[in-house]
Image (spheres, helix red, strand yellow):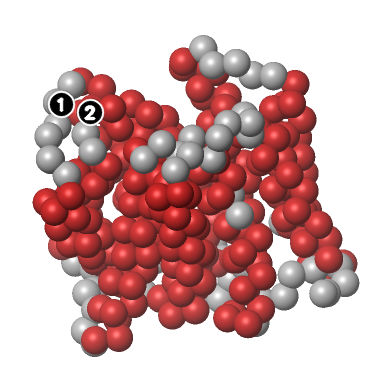
Amino acid sequence: MSLSSAAGQAPKWVAFMPPVFVLLWSTGFIGAKFGMPYAEPFTFLSLRFAIAAVAMTLIAILARAPWPTTFVEFRDAIVVGLLLHGIYLGGVFLGISLGTGAGISAVITGLQPLLTAALALPFLHERVSRLQAAGLLIGFSGLVLVVWTGQEAGPWGGIVACLSALVGITVATLYQKRFAARRDLRTSTALQLIAALLFLAPLAVLFETRSVDWTNEFIFALLWLAIPMSIGTFSLLNIMIRWGAVAKVTSLFYLVPPVVVIESWALFGETLNLRQGAGMVLAALGVALVASPRKTQRKL
């Protein structure tokens, strides 16, 4: 899997990845809704990562992809795996299981593009223009309009879990861009998934009953989240981080809640109101501003 180009520029096909990424990432929330009633969060995620790790390792072996040969290369893959898969997904699933509403968890983790942009300058020396900064704020406003239901925040444990998820995915994005962007995607992803499994499986053993109701809905959700999501969607995220500024890439997360709302309306008959429609427009506008060419913009 070659991801380089002769001129050092992103391959043309990368330009088509954002809409594919948004669509696939949004289905993760639908899959969680199908699967969460049938297993506890760490048990669910451990099964997911076990399947994904085996599949990705086989892919890497069959493709004869180069495995890391130094401690630093192994360390970087493990750190990203723990943060991106373990802390982020573990925090979101735990928060929801503790009673934090989906809307609250989406708002908290939706701060990620803003936090990433704020840290991009000191960590990556990437500047955000004033127009892009405005786009990030507009996009977040749109996200709040889409997901906010006026619900109670829920127990503090759930809030802390979601805040941990926010920190996990933010630091993982910055770390991946700075230290691990040029590593082989196949073997790095396999190691990331193995690291997440080794992190979450002991938590399932220590704190959960590990009881699973193997319904058709659960099996479908598990397989969908393990293969298209944990392998496909996270690979797309890593590819876009490799070839783009992190503020632009993470701004795409503003488009995920609107797509989830539309999917929930189509699949579960959930309501879609004018406020959410306005939020979708603002989210799209925010992402468009962040993705606009920087050469015409004044820097902060």
The vertical placement of 165 against 118, above or below, is: above
Q: Which residue is mark 2?
A: 38
Q: Position of 82 compared to 174: left or right?
A: left
Looking at the picture, how far across and down is residue 294, in whole percent?
79, 67
Q: Nearer the viewer, residue 189 or 218?
A: 218
Does residue 163 appear in the picture of this structure?
Answer: yes
The answer to whether residue 157 is left or right of residue 41 is: right
Q: Are marks 1 and 2 in contact (CB under 8 Å)?
A: yes
Q: Is residue 176 above or below residue 230?
A: below
Q: Nearer the viewer, residue 12 or 268?
A: 268
| Residue 119: % across, % down | 62, 73
In the image, what residue type sits under mark 1?
Answer: Asp
* Quarter of the figure with the N terminus: bottom left
| Residue 20 visible here | no
| Residue 95 placement, left or right of 118 | left
Q: In the displayed structure, does residue 293 sit left or right of residue 140?
A: right
Disc nearer the start of the sequence (1/2) = 2
Query: Which quarter of the picture shows residue 272?
Result: top right
Q: Which residue is mark 1?
A: 213
Q: Looking at the picture, which amino acid does disc 2 mark?
A: Tyr
Give residue 291's quadrant in the image.
bottom right
